[in-house]
Amino acid sequence: MSNWTTGTCDAGGTTIHYLRTGGAKPPLVLLHGLTGNGACWAPVARLLEADFDVVMPDARGHGKSSTPLHGYRYDDHASDVVGLIRPLELNAPILIGHSMGGMTAAVVASRHGHLVSGVILADPTFLSPQRQREVCDSDAAEQHRRLLSRNKDDLLAELRNRHSHRSAEILELLVDARLQTRMSAFDVLVPPNPEFRQLVSAIRVPILIVLGESPVVSMETARELQNLNSRVRTEQIENAGHGLPYDQPERLAAVVRSFMVCQACR
């Protein structure tokens, strides 16, 4: 990351911090999930930076971005992404979103499709209303509250035990990101989410849905979305769970490259 630049954008009063690999290359904007930050994309970005200008923002309430008192709905996150694309003069970037970032990317593409040329959704939070309520009613926020008071070394040791296949780099990046995630960020879990079938139906640019072996989005749902919008393609990555960028960064980067080649050939 030594040659990457950092900066901030004012997105309607919220300061959004970002990392950027730079260069006169096709732009990619990588959107992380809840409790992540832009730096968590580093292993993927490193594999892509030779051919792409990779921009990795911290969502509001995460990383080094600011924490407004209110405004953690997906519409707010999408507005922040638009507030990043325009001042950075990114020409029709492809959005790549993981989990929360995947839903955010879908909102941007459905409502501001003229700004982007495609979207890659890595196991986005396309949840049924019942599942949304279950997640909101869970103790996820309380678990995070307790985590914020814990020692970094203890958290690293715990993650190593749970995810021994992940690199030491990504485990440290994930712990740092979690410790930088403010409690207000969990407001995004409050239902209702945007209706994902309506979002996908409204997108007029190519869409790739990437799933692991135990995804939030089932293959059945992915096939349903393909029937709703002929622009949707799906790909499954083996030996990966919901944390696709962390479990299989090389394979995810290869999928991104393949998608970009397909768009260039159109």
Image: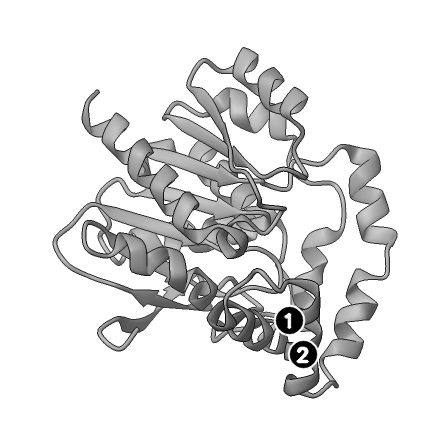
Observer-nearest residue: 71 or 215?
215
Q: Position of residue 162 (x, y in %)?
A: 70, 64
Q: Residues within 10 Å of mark 1 (few under 14, many from 20)?
A: some
Q: Residues within 10 Å of mark 2 (few under 14, many from 20)?
A: few
From what the image shows, is residue 207 above or below residue 251?
Answer: above
Task: Report the Cα–Cα distance between label 2 and label 1.
Answer: 5 Å
From what the image shows, is residue 56 above or below residue 135?
Answer: below
Residue at 49%, 15% in the rendered image: 229
Question: Looking at the rendering, which quadrant does residue 187 occupy?
Answer: bottom right
- According to the picture, the residue beneath numbered tag 1 turns out to be 160
Secondary element type, mark 1: helix
Observer-nearest residue: 47 or 195?
47
Secondary element type, mark 2: helix
Q: At label 2, which amino acid type do we have?
A: Ala
Q: Position of residue 70 (x, y in %)?
A: 65, 64
Question: Looking at the rendering, which quadrant does residue 17 occupy?
Answer: bottom left
- According to the picture, the residue beneath numbered tag 2 turns out to be 157
Residue at 85%, 61% in the rendered image: 139
Q: Position of residue 31 (x, y in %)?
A: 46, 53
Q: Is residue 197 left or right of residue 143?
A: left
Question: Looking at the rendering, which quadrant does residue 83 occupy?
Answer: bottom left
From what the image shows, is residue 5 above or below residue 116?
Answer: below
Q: Is residue 25 left or right of residue 70?
A: left
Dots 2 and 1: beta carbons under 8 Å?
yes
Residue 117 shows up from this direction: no
